[in-house]
Image (cartoon, grey):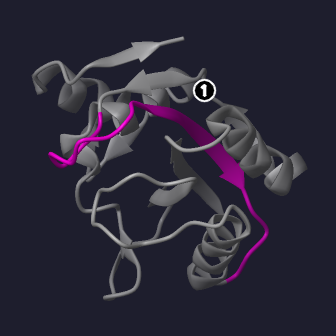
Amino acid sequence: MRAVLSTGSNMEDSRAHLVSVVRAFGPEVIAQSSLYRSAPWGGIEQEAFLNQALLIDAPLDDPFTLLNRCQELERAANRVREVRWGPRTLDVDIVDIEGFTSTHPVLTVPHPRAHEREFVLRPWLEIDPEAHLNGEPVRDILARLEPQGVEKL
């Protein structure tokens, strides 16, 4: 199952948290983007985020198994969900899964707000220049967005 993950962190050792995801998926990682610094999303006063996109090929039959793996990594990083869009040690979102869509309350794929977020689209485009989201080239979606304070490190 080929999937795009978006990772982010703005607490503790953010680089180490993002590296932990790459290590956890190990040989399943086809490509990983550079690190990006991004302004916080959602209007909550907090530190800037480090973000990265991963393209993985996970040998899973069930996308919910992938979701569970992502959530386990967040738990291992002591992720606390107190404030929506608030600070976090680690966020691991499934952005897209090749050939799969879902509107399930627990797993919506493609990610419902990916098209609005430069910190998701820019790293994704770096590792997959031909990427599409909802049938549209990611490059075209990104070109329409106003700058959101995302910089490649």
Q: Which of 106 and 132 is in front in this view?
A: 106
> Residue at point 62% right, 65% down?
74
Quadrant of the rendered image containing residue 137: top left
Q: Name the residue under label 1.
A: 33
Residue 104 locus on image (x, y percent) = 33, 88
Q: Give the range drawn in magenta.
A: 40-61
Which quadrant, please, contains the N terminus?
bottom right
Secondary structure of the residue carrying numbered label 1: loop
Count of all numbered marks drawn on residues in the image? 1
Q: Along the horizontal axis of the image, is 149 left or right of 106? A: left
Any part of residue 78 in sight: yes
Q: x and y percent of residue 81 in the render?
A: 42, 72
The image shows residue 29 at horizontal and vertical percentages of: 77, 44
Q: Is 149 left or right of 9, judged from the image as shown?
A: left
- The amino acid beneath tag 1 is Ser
Q: Is 128 positioned to the left or the right of 83 in the image?
A: right
